[in-house]
Every structure is written in C-alpha cells, then in structure tokens.
Image (cartoon, rainbow, N blue to C red):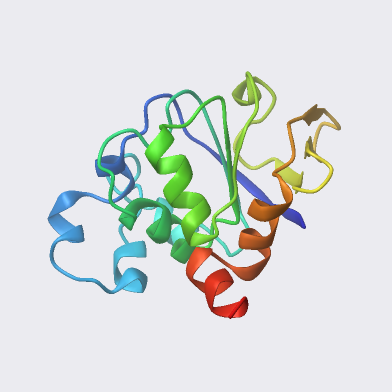
Amino acid sequence: MILRGKVWVLGDHINTDVIIPAKYKFRTGDFSELAKHVFEDLDPTLASKISKGDSIIAGRTFGMGSSREHAPRVIKEAGISAIVACSFARIFFRNSINVGLPVIEVRDVNKYFKEGDIAIVDLEKGIVKNETTGVELNFSPYPEFIMNIMKAGGLAAYRKGIR
C-alpha cells in the first residue's frame, strides 16, 4: 500500500479533544458530520482544507486522551490517509489500526516536513518520503496481520471477510 498526499503539520501532544471537541462528539454519531469539525480548536478552517488522501505529520504523543474510537474515525472520515508522528498514545494507535487508519512512528519525522509538502508512505516497504525535498525516512513495516487489516479498511471489515 502506497499512500500519497499533501501534508498537514501538527505539533506535540495533540489530544483527542483537540481532534474532535467534546461539544460535537456527544451530539451525533454521524462521522461525516463530526469530520467537519476535526482539529477545529487548532485551526477552525483546517477541516475544509483537507483533501482525500492528505497526511498528517506530527510530533510526540499524538492522540493522547480519551480511549474512544471517535478520534481516528473522524480523522479518517475527513480524508486523511495516514498519520506519521514521532510517537502515539497507545490506545489511539490501536484504535487507528482497528478503524483502518495507518499510523506510523518515525523518530523526528516532524523535522523533515513542512505544511504543503507531499508525503509518500509505503506501508509495505517501511518508507516515508518527502516528495518535495527528496528526504526518505525508514520505519518498521506493519506485520502481515496488521497489513491485512489495513487492506480490508479496518478490523470489522477484515473480520467480515474471513468468515
């Protein structure tokens, strides 16, 4: 799986309430409606600027906070194809895998991208490339069973396909 898209750069410690503010996540279960408010507290216009296939590059402990799957589901619904960060909160990382949103840890990745760059993420080879600058960084590819979940679009879709 190779993913290519424009980069949105976010900082350290992006918590789940910044990803989707609580004032929205308890009003509706409609993820397309919630996606209109993704990252609203960081930038009220960001959701309207994200295009399908874009990527997020972030710093440390991305996704800290609530253990609900709302945050990665809303990010995926907004059109983000992958998040590459220095580190993730463990529960956010696992919830992202469950919903089929690729999350990749790369040490100091935020030093090699700026907003608007084009990122290419090769999940099978373990490479994230800044197409704009030519910088390539390596990461440990997912094991086969997680790649199968990604290819299926998430754990629920994967489980339906193996019956």
Examine the image and state in which quarter residue 73 appears: bottom left
Examine the image and state in which quarter residue 43 appears: top left
Identify whether 111 is placed above or below 16: above
Examine the image and state in which quarter residue 159 appears: bottom right
Question: What residue is drawn where x is 18% and y is 59%?
Answer: 24
Decide if residue 22 is on the left or right side of residue 32. left
Q: Quadrant of the C terminus?
A: bottom right
Identify whether 25 is placed above or below 16: below
Question: What residue is drawn where x is 43% and y is 61%?
Answer: 48
Question: What residue is drawn where x is 36% and y is 63%?
Answer: 35
Question: What residue is drawn where x is 63% and y is 18%?
Answer: 108
From the top left corner, tell me how far across and down residue 116 is, in percent. Answer: 64, 42
Q: Quadrant of the N terminus?
A: bottom right
From the top left corner, tell me how far across and down residue 58 is, in percent. Answer: 52, 32
Of the pair 98 and 34, the residue shown nearer to us: 98
From the top left corner, tell me how far across and down residue 68 is, in percent. Answer: 28, 51
Residue furthest toward the front? Answer: 163
